[in-house]
């Protein structure tokens, strides 16, 4: 017998005795990288290391490492520099030592680029605080140090370019997580804006190393965003914004004012201003002549991280990347990826097809948008001729729209996690006939967000799962997530329980043939709405991936858990197939007759399903 034939028979035998747990062959297939634009975090003017100036563009790569692009403002010639650590950096400044500094969002690292020694690329200076993972912003102090504001303990950190000393100056607030902004005043004091649950304005004195709050009593922030923002303005003073309140900071006195100068323009030494910049573009204006010039530059990215994948019109697969939010389409017939365009949020959380069009709901604010593949070319906006057209947020209590489904009468139900600094998400009812929210239910599950939904027609109920966490900057106050039922007729929650004691969320819920399937951790529960009891609990091959459970046209259920594709037969209530992916399954979910699609880092993948007829 030939060796290949023997190996095949052995594999067939093992697959049979293991109940289909091992595949006969690899059904996983990479479909390439749909988007490669990179996430632009900012642009600054800095020294080029040769006596002149350059524009520096800071790009994140959420599935890789950040990079810096140095661009000649006169020619657009570009040089790209890499880092050994960090997918992205919010903090970005030209230091007093004529070097460029970045502060990462993964690890809270201080990075440095020396234009006079470009061969060193970007170097890691160090980690100023053991507890912090984000350095949000930098400010250059009068003492020659760089000060950074951090997360998750709302600290102030510093780096001294002259001595190389890194310092952790401690928490700027006893309970808050976000020290989101920082500014240096003309008096040498450092001002920090804090949020998100309780906004605070803090002053730090580098001479005494002491800090205190400057927040006047009685001020209230904007709804959903209780965060103070500080910034240096063109008059050389620092101002603080807190909702509708504007304050000028004079030493350690905060004075309410009605107006403030704008922020300083980004200028070159010769007076030319950077009036616009983008991924590969920038514009310069000469105030002497009033003329503007547009230039382009080139760079190379590994690709943008795929955040969500879903079914769309025409049998195509649609998806969104994260930071930047770019929308792409994959045609299963031609195997072609198409980058459609961007939108101004962070990432799309949920997709839903309707009559040849596609709803896309994104973070932040659970903003609803409608794209028509047969309509005008991609042009995002609120105008009637926009495509996609945006309708704004779906309502109070919505920030991250994790779940979006059809319910009774063709209405769309949107479940979201709550805004920053708040507990208790919401479920909105969106009428696609008029494209607006007609009902909104805040705190449907007390102090929790809504992360999965399913309509069960026999009972007429909307079933869903919550997550016990709140918005950014909060801490959970409920010990476990809930599984619940909502009656669209009476407009009330009629049932709530904890199927899995201690579970943090129910990330995927699906209704099929009178039963509801929901997940928590690495378990799948089959729930009977008639008796309101769990009729069976099944172990999954790992933790369930969010919104990644669907019904195949043949009747069986397909899901992702623990880096594995699994198939469940509703007739036997057993998992009949488990196939471990060669890569991490980061997100889903799009299901067709012959395949299921998912994202892994920057790459779109498909799994070719075995025949699954009823």
Image: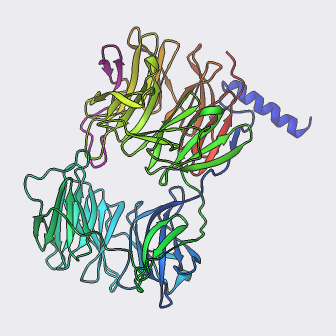
* Left or right side of 553 for 492: left
At 36% from the left and 60% from the top, the residue drawn is 133
Residue 274, above or below 548 = below
**Which quadrant of the view contains residue 582?**
top right
Query: Which residue sits furthest right?
Result: 1
**Which quadrant of the view contains residue 134?**
bottom left
Residue 576, above or below 186 = above
Q: Main structural element of the magenta stretch: helix, strand or loop?
A: loop
Count of number-bearing discs: 0
> What x and y, as percent, mark residue 104?
41, 64
What segment carries the magenta color?
A: 469-498
* Left or right side of 423 for 207: left
Query: Which residue sits furthest left?
Result: 217
- Is residue 490 inside the magenta stretch? yes
Residue 315, above or below 252 = above
> What x and y, as percent, mark residue 308?
52, 42
Residue 17, above or below 258 = above
At 53% from the left and 48% from the top, the residue drawn is 379
- Is residue 334 inside the magenta stretch? no
* Left or right side of 89 for 252: left
Residue 505, visible in the rendered structure:
no
> What x and y, as percent, mark residue 484?
35, 22
- Quarter of the picture containing the N terminus is top right
At 15% from the left and 63% from the top, the residue drawn is 247
> What x and y, as percent, mark residue 65?
52, 63
- Quarter of the picture containing the C terminus is top right
């Amino acid at each position: 017998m030939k060796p290949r034939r023997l190996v095949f028979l052995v594999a067939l035998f093992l697959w049979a005795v293991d109940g289909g747990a091992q595949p006969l062959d690899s059904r996983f297939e990479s479909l390439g990288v749909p988007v490669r634009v990179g996430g632009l975090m900012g642009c600054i003017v800095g020294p080029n290391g040769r006596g002149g100036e350059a524009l520096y563009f800071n790009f994140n790569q959420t599935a890789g490492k950040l990079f810096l692009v140095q661009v000649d403002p006169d020619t657009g010639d570009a040089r790209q520099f890499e880092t050994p650590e960090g997918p992205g950096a919010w903090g970005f400044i030209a230091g007093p030592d004529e070097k460029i500094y970045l502060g990462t969002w993964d690890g809270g690292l201080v990075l440095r680029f020396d234009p006079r020694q470009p061969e060193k690329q970007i170097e890691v200076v160090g980690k100023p605080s053991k507890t912090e993972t984000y350095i949000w912003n930098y400010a250059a102090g009068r003492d020659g140090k760089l000060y950074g504001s951090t997360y998750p303990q709302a600290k102030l950190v510093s780096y001294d370019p002259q001595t190389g000393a890194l310092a952790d100056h401690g928490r700027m607030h006893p309970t808050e997580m976000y020290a989101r902004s920082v500014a240096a005043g003309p008096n040498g004091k450092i001002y920090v804006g804090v949020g998100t649950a309780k906004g605070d304005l803090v002053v730090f004195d580098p001479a005494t190393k002491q800090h205190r709050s400057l927040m006047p009593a009685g001020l209230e922030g904007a709804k959903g965003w209780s965060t103070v923002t500080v910034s240096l303005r063109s008059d050389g003073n620092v101002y603080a914004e807190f909702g509708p309140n504007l304050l000028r900071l004079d030493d350690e006195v905060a004075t309410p004012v009605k107006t403030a100068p704008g922020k300083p323009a980004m200028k070159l030494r010769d007076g030319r201003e950077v009036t616009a910049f983008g991924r590969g573009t920038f514009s310069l204006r000469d105030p002497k002549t009033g003329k503007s010039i547009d230039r382009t530059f080139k760079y190379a990215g590994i690709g943008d991280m795929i955040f969500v994948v879903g079914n769309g019109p025409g049998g195509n697969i649609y998806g969104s990347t994260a930071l930047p939010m770019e929308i792409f389409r994959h045609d299963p017939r031609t195997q072609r990826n198409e980058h459609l365009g961007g939108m101004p949020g962070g990432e799309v959380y949920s997709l839903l097809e309707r009559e040849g069009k596609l709803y896309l709901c994104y973070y932040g604010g659970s903003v609803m948008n409608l794209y028509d593949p047969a309509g005008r070319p991609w042009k995002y906006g609120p105008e009637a001729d926009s495509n996609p057209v945006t309708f704004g947020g779906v309502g109070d209590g919505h920030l991250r729209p994790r779940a979006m489904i059809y319910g009774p009468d063709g209405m769309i139900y949107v479940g979201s996690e709550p805004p920053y600094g708040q507990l208790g998400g919401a479920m909105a009812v969106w009428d696609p006939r008029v494209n607006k929210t007609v009902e909104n239910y805040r705190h449907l599950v007390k102090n929790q967000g809504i992360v999965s939904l399913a309509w069960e027609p026999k009972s007429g109920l909307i079933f869903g799962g919550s997550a016990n966490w709140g918005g950014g900057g909060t801490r959970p106050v409920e010990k476990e997530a809930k599984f619940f039922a909502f009656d669209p007729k009476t407009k009330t929650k009629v049932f709530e329980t904890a199927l899995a004691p201690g579970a943090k969320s129910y990330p995927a819920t699906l209704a099929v043939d009178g039963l509801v399937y929901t997940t928590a951790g690495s378990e799948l529960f089959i729930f009977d709405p008639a008796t309101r009891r769990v009729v069976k609990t099944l172990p999954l091959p790992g933790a369930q991936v969010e919104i990644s459970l669907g019904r195949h046209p043949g009747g069986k259920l397909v899901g992702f858990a623990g880096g594995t594709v699994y198939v469940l037969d509703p007739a036997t209530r057993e998992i009949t197939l488990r196939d471990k992916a060669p890569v991490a399954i980061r997100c889903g979910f799009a299901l067709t007759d012959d395949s299921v699609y998912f994202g892994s880092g920057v790459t779109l993948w498909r799994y070719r399903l075995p025949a699954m007829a009823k």
